[in-house]
Image (spheres, rainbow, N blue to C red):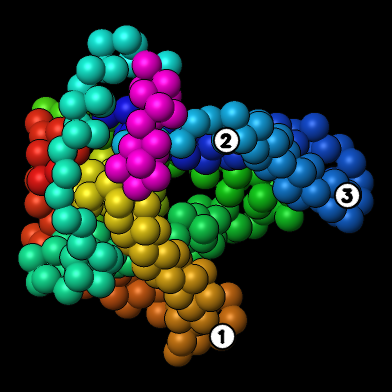
Amino acid sequence: MMIAAVFASQGTGILVGALFTVMALAIFQSAIRADQNNLDYVWRLMLAFGCVPALFTVYFRLTMPESPRYTLEVNGNIEQATKDMINILGEQEKERIETQQKITKVQSSFTEYFGQWKNLKILLGTSLSWFFLDIAFYGLSLNQSYILQAIGYSSKGLSPYDALWSEAVGNLIISLMGTVPGYWFTVFLIERMGRIKIQLMGFAFLTVIFIVLSAGFYKIRNTAIALFIALFTLAQFFFNFGPNTTTFVLPSEVFPTRFRSTAHGISAASGKLGAIIATFGFNQLVEIGGKDGEHAFLPQTLGIFSGIMFLGLLSTFWVPETKGKSLEEISGE
């Protein structure tokens, strides 16, 4: 629950980013209407504003202690581990740490541990599910304005400023109605429902939503743009009340301490590979079969995303449920 809450800060950042865009456009409205080149100030301010939380992050990370489990089990420094654990959880943890330090066993290497299929399939499950998720998640999240343009929400008969304003408000609505609530549904339900159930549910709903959006794209666009926005918002909700959060949480739990950060890093890197594919491929893919700006292949692209979400669902079955278990129980430490 705590890890999910930390991850939910991403949703807060997305919301603040959307809100800051609306504020910046409102402040420079008169200047932009007088001279469109004044939009230059808006995007520069938006980009610079992103440095503010990063500066705070650097400070807090530099002053944050390493995980006591890592300090104890990898570095073998019981004194520092005890000190860090007591600072976090109190004096009662000291005896448990000292008892744990007395337990000796042969520790396998990374290649030996993941050379066993029962362990390798878990790493493949966390990596592939994160990979498949990020293709669709970043393909859509980084191109929400693109989607809004494609369905005619923002561009019909509007001036450049009004089109951008409409897109910014659309992004803000999606963040408020779908993105942020999805994160916090996971925070409050992850210990009740379990990680795997939430991840499977999210992938399943996303598969169905993308099938509907793909199959009925033009009919929905031409007759009920509000329905399209609602379905798109629902997709953002189930990204976050689903695999976008759980693919981050599960790799932090299912691996032994000595491999946890490396395996989590491999899983995360797999996700970012999917994000790279989506970032550089989405705009080219949706223009297949038409002129630039027509988005002729967008319905088929959403259908491809549906298949990718189904693959994410299948890969989840390789990952064990961790609900109600301690890290030591999960890893057998």
Q: Which residue is mark 2?
A: 61
Tell me where the magenta segment starts and ends, as one range.
71-86
Q: Amino acid at mark 3?
A: Asn
Depth check: 80 or 161 in front?
A: 80
Residue furthest to the bottom in view is 289
Left of 268 or right of it: where is 332?
left
Residue 55 percent location from the top left of the image = 70, 36
User: Where residue 114 appears, x then y in whole percent?
Assistant: 20, 68
The answer to if 76 sits in the magenta stretch is yes
Q: Quadrant of the N terminus?
A: top left
Is residue 299 placed above or below 237 in the rendered structure?
Answer: below
Tags 1 and 2 in contact by the CB under 8 Å rule?
no
Residue tagged by mark 3? 38
Spatial CA distance of label 3 from label 2 is 37 Å
Q: Residue 185 falls in which quadrant of the image?
A: top left
Q: Which mark is residue 291?
A: 1
- Classed neighbour count for the residue bearing mark 2: other residues with Cα under 10 Å, few (<14), some (14–19), many (≥20): few
What kind of residue is marked 2?
Arg
Does the segment drawn in magenta span residue 88? Answer: no
Q: Earlier in the sequence, mark 3 or mark 2?
A: 3
The amino acid pointed to by label 1 is Lys
The reply to whether residue 318 is visible in this rendering is yes
How many neighbours does mark 1 have within 10 angstroms: few (below 14), some (14-19), or many (20 or more)? few
| Residue 285 occupies quadrant | bottom left
